[in-house]
């Protein structure tokens, strides 16, 4: 647990859902790192419009006698917390190829899969995603804001490149990503004993890649706007679900598990 000198941390997750995972993989990514570092924190609601960079998660650090400080962007949040020794720098011991593998896994999910799966959420299951993402905005204003969000996301996906693929091509690309992650996890699971956690790079401790992988697996398992990906994980990539279940039991026993 955190020491008496540790700062008070509030993680703003965007939804008022205590003891539940949220649909953002980046929120769960930060929670994973806080919990595996035994760092206490409080969950706040907040929202993209309240965050320093206009997105979630963002984090507030408060120390007695000092002004509170807001941090945003999951990667930069964790980088700052590591630099200040608030959470463990789990990648400090990585060398050579492991450093590159860790970064590659994170980039594969955060810079590629994120945009590919965004189409499933914001285009194919728009109404479900709109009502969940914009839950705090009263209807009918939600209809107008939702249309603006829809157009912005469609443009974003197109400019990034993910929006230029057909639905069938997108599904195949998403499956390729999870096949790669699954291969790493299957190799790691063979080294695990009993029901203990196993990690993406096959080591005895998690790395930053695990925070990202866990965040993305859980995000898709709990997201009602991602039924295809949820089914894909459960039917074709069960090792990813098992990986998340073991982490859940070890580090998130107070949270509801996905169905």
Image (cartoon, helix red, strand yellow):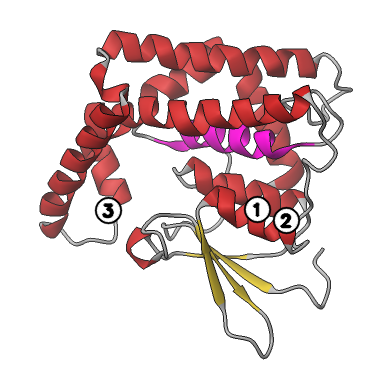
- The one nearer the camera, 150 or 138, is 150
Location of the N terminus (image quadrant): bottom right
Determine crowd level at label 3: few under 14, some 14-19, many 20+ residues with C-alpha closer than 10 A: some
Q: Give the answer, above or below, for where 188 lies relative to 147.
A: above
Q: Are marks 2 and 1 in contact (CB under 8 Å)?
A: yes
Q: Helix, strand or loop at disc 3? A: loop
| Distance between mark 1 and mark 3 Cα atoms | 29 Å
User: Within the magenta stretch, is there residue 214?
Assistant: yes
Instruction: Check disc 1 and report the residue beneath it.
Output: 79
Q: Residue placed at 47% from the left, 47% from the top?
A: 22
- The one nearer the camera, 94 or 30, is 94
| Distance between mark 2 and mark 1 Cα atoms | 5 Å
Q: Left or right: where does residue 50 sit relative to residue 183?
A: left
Over which residues does the magenta segment extend?
206-223
Q: Helix, strand or loop at disc 1? A: helix
User: Within the magenta stretch, is there residue 137?
Assistant: no
**Residue 82: numbered disc:** 2
Q: How many marks?
A: 3
Q: Residue placed at 29% from the left, 28% from the top?
A: 119
Mark 1 or 3, which is nearer the eye?
1
Q: Helix, strand or loop at disc 2? A: helix
Q: Which percent across, then down, holds residue 77? A: 59, 56
**Residue 134: numbered disc:** 3
| Distance between mark 3 and mark 2 Cα atoms | 32 Å
Q: Are marks 1 and 3 in contact (CB under 8 Å)?
A: no
**Residue 110: numbered disc:** none
């Amino acid at each position: 647990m955190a020491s008496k000198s540790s700062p008070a941390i509030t993680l703003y997750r965007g939804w008022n859902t205590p003891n539940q995972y949220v649909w953002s993989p980046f929120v769960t990514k930060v929670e994973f790192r806080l919990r595996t570092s035994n760092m206490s924190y409080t969950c706040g609601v907040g929202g993209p419009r309240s965050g320093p960079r206009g997105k979630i998660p963002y984090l507030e650090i408060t120390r007695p006698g000092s002004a509170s400080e807001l941090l945003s962007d999951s990667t930069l949040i964790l980088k700052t917390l590591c630099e200040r020794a608030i959470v463990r720098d789990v990648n400090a011991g990585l060398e050579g190829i492991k450093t590159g593998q860790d970064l590659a896994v994170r980039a594969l999910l955060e810079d590629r899969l994120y945009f590919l799966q965004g189409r499933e959420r914001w285009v194919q299951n728009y109404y479900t995603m709109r009502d969940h993402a914009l839950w705090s905005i009263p209807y009918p204003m939600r209809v107008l804001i939702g249309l603006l969000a829809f157009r912005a996301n469609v443009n974003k996906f197109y400019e990034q490149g993910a929006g230029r693929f057909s639905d069938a091509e997108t599904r195949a690309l998403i499956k390729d990503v999870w096949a790669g992650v699954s291969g790493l996890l299957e190799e790691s699971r063979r080294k695990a004993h009993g029901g203990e956690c196993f990690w993406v790079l096959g080591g005895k401790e998690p790395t930053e890649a695990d925070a990202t992988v866990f965040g993305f697996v859980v995000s898709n398992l709990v997201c009602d706007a991602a039924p295809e990906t949820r089914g894909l994980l459960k039917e074709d990539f069960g090792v990813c679900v098992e990986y998340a279940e073991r982490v859940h039991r070890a580090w998130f026993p107070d949270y509801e598990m996905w169905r």
